[in-house]
């Protein structure tokens, strides 16, 4: 299922065109399943809290929630080594948490405080962390895709065996920078995973209203040596299985891949956007909500007997405490001092 | 001291810095096998191999982004634009990526990259190939902008730019590549952000940079015959600008003409005049005048092109005007 597969032409109802299934697998490895569930649930509850903080004015500016897409970040990033690289878009809270930036540092950044992972200078859209090789959330659609190719170039230049994972939205496939980067990555055999998180919309524009080829992974066909892979993004194990191959290809053969992870965003494009809005129906949203990547894994585990209700309740409690702690920490963290205004415009080279 | 061309000076700088630091690589269109569109990278592919002298597709946005990404994780790319006109396709990576990375990451990711190539007009290349972008680029905090006007400064500034931990934009000139000057072999470093008084006179300051330095020197020579002696202040770096050098000269001469290759509105000269009025108001004996390209796209026809460009005659007229001479 979660492999190369031609989707149908236009006209089919969306869910029928999706790879998403109503049941997800468990790993058969309860420890792994629990870790994945924990990782996804942390993102979910963290972001729900983010929504609350935004409503209270604790967070300002643009803020894009990842709710519904957690299997993508968890599925891929959980398989990376600490010395690999991750780069993505403004919709970056989920990837940042899975990569290991602490909930405290992420929340403090959202609050614009000095203890934030970007010292309050980046905000929601620009989470960065040198310790985990998290190369940022980037705000210009498509701009970071060549940067990822550059990271791949540097890995190869030094003869390393790391990989770079580049997350992007579905609308990126229509941007020139995407194609320029893919061409060079294929031409120069760069160890990069280009991951399209196809949540079906770029703001309010459905993929098929913007992309002449809306089978997005097939964009890879234009470049020799670039594998295009279609993945069910509501099933964390499907994401893991397929991305594992792409990671191996990158690490061992220094070859790039283009992954289309079909997913769905359960909230509005950003905080100012209604949850369903004028561009998609409540029915469609409900349909996808049934495929919730977090709860479907939980249910599968409950059914398989690898998770008990009590264990789930405990996980919820533990995560609620982590999330509350991140809020308390962020709230107590000082605003950056006025002097920070002039810091880090340039590296000081006067000494 | 050896006399070499501006082109050779750049070539030496690249060669020396690549030999000195294996994190330095050159990427751009035609930089390798073809030896560079203007032969600046001549011989480098042979010497350093295709890992370090990388022929890119015609994809300015893409390969400049590759440079930024590589710089974020520790390499020191030199990105060559065939000309800055084409770099407009890459401006997003210069402005939104390179210039912003350190700040928006809270100091975690600097971008030690050089974006370089010829800027401004050559001869009869018409509207799309004859533009000077100093003021666009200098507007942006988070980058440095250097504009060498002589072979010595070309070598010294490129070497400094490559060693700088920040993004540096270097604006060269097609019409400069063949110009000659004294350049020592080996280590030449010109500090970024430091202007140079290229000619000393006491009557009027000509403040200029890049290709226009040559024009200013000719102006100085011609005016000397009429017993008018000018200071030629070569800014060498547009951002950060060496305002002290401007003030020192203008306080002495009490008159100034600002000469630049680009257009008038929001040009470099507008900023220089602002600095002067703020600091030297009481010293001025005449309003500061500006010489620049006329406010039109560059025409192809020879006579029209000449009318459009700032030149020696226009600059002499401006100097005489601020000196109330005819
Ligand atoms: C070049 C550019 N144009 C427009 C925007 C405004 N914008 C921000 S997000 C967005 C939609 C992007 O959709 P998609 O790539 O599918 O990512 P998603 O938001 O769904 O994660 C737009 C138009 C932008 N940031 N950059
Ligand atoms: Mg989208």
Image: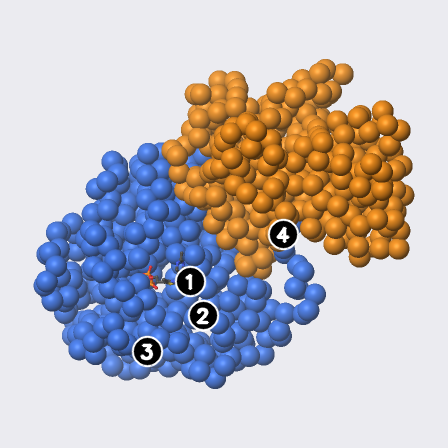
Does ligand 1 reach within 8 Å of label 4's beta carbon?
no
* Secondary element at tag 3: loop
**Nearest-to-viewer mark from 3 and 1:** 3
For the residue pair B76 and A243, the one nearer the viewer reads as B76
Q: Quadrant of the N terminus of chain B?
A: top right
Mark nearest the camera among 1 and 4 is 4
The answer to whether mark 2 and mark 1 are in CB contact below 8 A is: yes
Q: Which residue is mark 3?
A: A274
Picture quarter containing residue B220? Answer: top right
The residue drawn where x is 43% and y is 47% is A147
Label 3, label 4: how many angstroms apart (C-alpha)? 42 Å
Q: Earlier in the sequence, mark 3 or mark 2?
A: 2
Q: Position of residue A8 (x, y in %)?
A: 10, 56
Query: Percent x, y for residue A222?
Result: 23, 40
For the C terminus of chain B, which image quadrant?
top right
Q: Which residue is mark 4?
A: B266
> Which residue, given by chain and number where applicable, does mark 1 sit on?
A90
Comparing A227 with A245, the one in front is A227
Q: In the rendering, which numbered label is found on residue A16?
A: none
Residue A292 in percent (x, y) is at 23, 72
Q: Residue at x 50, y 31 (%)?
A: B300
The chain coloured blue in the image: A
């Amino acid at each position: 299922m979660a492999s190369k597969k031609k989707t149908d032409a236009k006209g089919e109802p969306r869910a029928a065109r999706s790879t998403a299934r109503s049941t997800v697998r468990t790993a058969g490895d309860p420890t792994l399943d629990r870790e994945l569930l924990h990782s996804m649930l942390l993102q979910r509850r963290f972001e729900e809290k983010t929504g609350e903080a935004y409503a209270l004015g604790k967070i300002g500016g643009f803020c894009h929630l990842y709710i519904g897409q957690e299997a993508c970040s968890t599925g891929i990033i959980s398989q990376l080594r600490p010395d690999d690289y991750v780069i993505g878009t403004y919709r970056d809270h989920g990837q940042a948490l899975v990569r290991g930036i602490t909930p405290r540092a992420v929340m403090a950044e959202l609050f614009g405080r000095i203890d934030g992972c970007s010292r309050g200078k980046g905000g929601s859209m620009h989470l960065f962390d040198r310790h985990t090789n998290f190369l940022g959330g980037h705000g210009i659609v498509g701009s970071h895709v060549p940067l990822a190719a550059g990271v791949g170039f540097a890995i190869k230049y030094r003869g390393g065996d790391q990989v770079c994972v580049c997350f992007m939205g579905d609308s990126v496939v229509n941007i020139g920078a995407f194609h320029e980067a893919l061409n060079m990555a294929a031409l120069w055999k760069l160890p990069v995973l280009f991951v399209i998180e196809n949540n079906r919309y770029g703001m309010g524009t459905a993929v098929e209203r913007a992309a002449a080829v809306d089978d997005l992974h097939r964009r890879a066909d234009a470049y020799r040596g670039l594998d295009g892979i279609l993945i069910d993004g509501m099933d964390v194990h499907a994401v893991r299985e397929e991305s594992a191959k792409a990671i191996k290809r990158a690490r061992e053969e220094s070859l790039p891949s283009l992954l289309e992870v079909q997913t769905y965003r359960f909230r509005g494009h950003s905080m100012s956007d209604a949850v369903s809005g004028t561009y998609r129906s409540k029915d469609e949203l409900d349909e996808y909500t049934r495929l919730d990547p977090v709860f479907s894994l939980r249910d599968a585990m409950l059914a398989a007997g690898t998770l008990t209700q009590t264990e789930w309740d405990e996980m919820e409690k533990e995560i609620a405490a982590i999330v509350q702690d991140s809020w308390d920490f962020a709230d107590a963290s000082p605003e950056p001092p006025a002097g920070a205004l002039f810091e880090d415009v340039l590296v000081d080279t006067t000494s | 001291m050896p006399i070499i061309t501006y082109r050779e000076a750049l070539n030496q700088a690249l060669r020396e810095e690549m030999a000195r630091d294996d994190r330095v690589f050159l990427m751009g269109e035609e930089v390798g096998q073809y030896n560079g569109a203007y032969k600046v990278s001549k011989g480098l592919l042979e010497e350093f191999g295709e890992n370090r002298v990388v022929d890119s597709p015609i994809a300015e946005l893409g390969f400049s982004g590759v440079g930024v990404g590589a710089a974020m994780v520790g390499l020191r790319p030199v990105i060559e634009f065939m000309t800055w006109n084409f770099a407009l396709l890459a401006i997003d990576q210069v402005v939104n990526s390179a210039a912003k990375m350190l700040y928006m990451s809270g100091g975690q990711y600097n971008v030690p990259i050089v974006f370089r190539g010829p800027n401004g007009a050559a001869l009869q290349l018409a509207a799309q190939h004859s533009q000077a972008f100093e003021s666009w680029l200098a507007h942006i905090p988070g980058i440095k902008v250097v504009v060498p006007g002589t072979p010595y400064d070309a070598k010294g500034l490129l070497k400094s730019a490559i060693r700088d931990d920040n993004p540096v934009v270097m604006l060269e000139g097609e019409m400069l590549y063949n110009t000659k000057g004294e350049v020592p072999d080996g280590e030449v470093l010109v500090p970024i952000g430091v202007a140079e008084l290229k000619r000393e006179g006491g009557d009027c300051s000509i403040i200029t940079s890049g290709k226009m330095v040559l024009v200013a020197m000719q102006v100085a020579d011609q005016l000397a015959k009429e017993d008018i002696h000018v200071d030629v202040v070569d800014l060498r770096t547009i951002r950060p600008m060496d305002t002290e050098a401007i003030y020192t000269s203008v306080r002495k001469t009490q008159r100034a003409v600002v000469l630049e290759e680009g257009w008038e509105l929001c040009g470099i000269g507008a900023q220089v005049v602002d600095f002067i009025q703020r600091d030297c108001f009481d010293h001025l004996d005449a309003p500061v005048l500006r010489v620049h390209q006329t406010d039109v796209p560059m025409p192809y026809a020879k006579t029209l092109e000449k009318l459009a460009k700032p030149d020696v005659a226009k600059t002499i007229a401006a100097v005489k005007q601020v000196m109330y001479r005819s």
